[in-house]
Amino acid sequence: MVRAGEEKERFVHNKKSNERNALIAYQLIIINDYEQRDSPPRK
């Protein structure tokens, strides 16, 4: 069985990387949205 300390460390690490991934995804969505709004609508 893993020690509680290791478990918590892993949890914190996962939380941090999840937050980073969410931030990256959010920025990509904004950039994508901005580019679509900026360009003329495709027919």
Image (cartoon, rainbow, N blue to C red):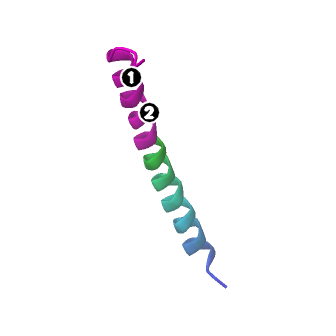
Residue farthest front in this picture: 43
Q: Amino acid at mark 1?
A: Gln
Give the label on residue 25, or none.
Answer: none
Q: Single out the mark in the foreground, 2 or 1.
A: 1
Residue at label 1?
Answer: 36
The residue lying at 67 percent from left, 85 percent from top is 1
Q: Quadrant of residue 32?
A: top left
Mark 1, residues whose alpha carbon is within 10 Å: few (<14), some, or many (≥20)? Answer: few
Residue farthest right in this picture: 1
Q: Position of residue 19 (x, y in %)?
A: 48, 47
- The residue tagged with tag 2: helix, strand or loop? helix
- The residue tagged with tag 1: helix, strand or loop? helix
| Main SS category, magenta section | helix
Check residue 38 for magenta coloring. Answer: yes
The residue lying at 57 percent from left, 62 percent from top is 11
Seen from the viewer's position, the closer of residues 40 and 19 is: 40
Check residue 7 for magenta coloring. Answer: no
Q: Quadrant of the C terminus?
A: top left
The residue lying at 40 percent from left, 42 percent from top is 24
Q: Amino acid at mark 2?
A: Ile
Q: Position of residue 22 (x, y in %)?
A: 48, 43
Give the label on residue 29, or none.
Answer: 2
Q: CA distance from mark 2 to mark 1?
A: 11 Å
Q: Position of residue 33 (x, y in %)?
A: 42, 25
Q: Is residue 10 toward the left or the right of residue 31 in the image?
A: right
Please tell me whether residue 26 is drawn above or below residue 10 in the rendered image. above
Q: Which residues are magenta?
A: 23-43
Q: Is residue 12 toward the left or the right of residue 29 in the image?
A: right
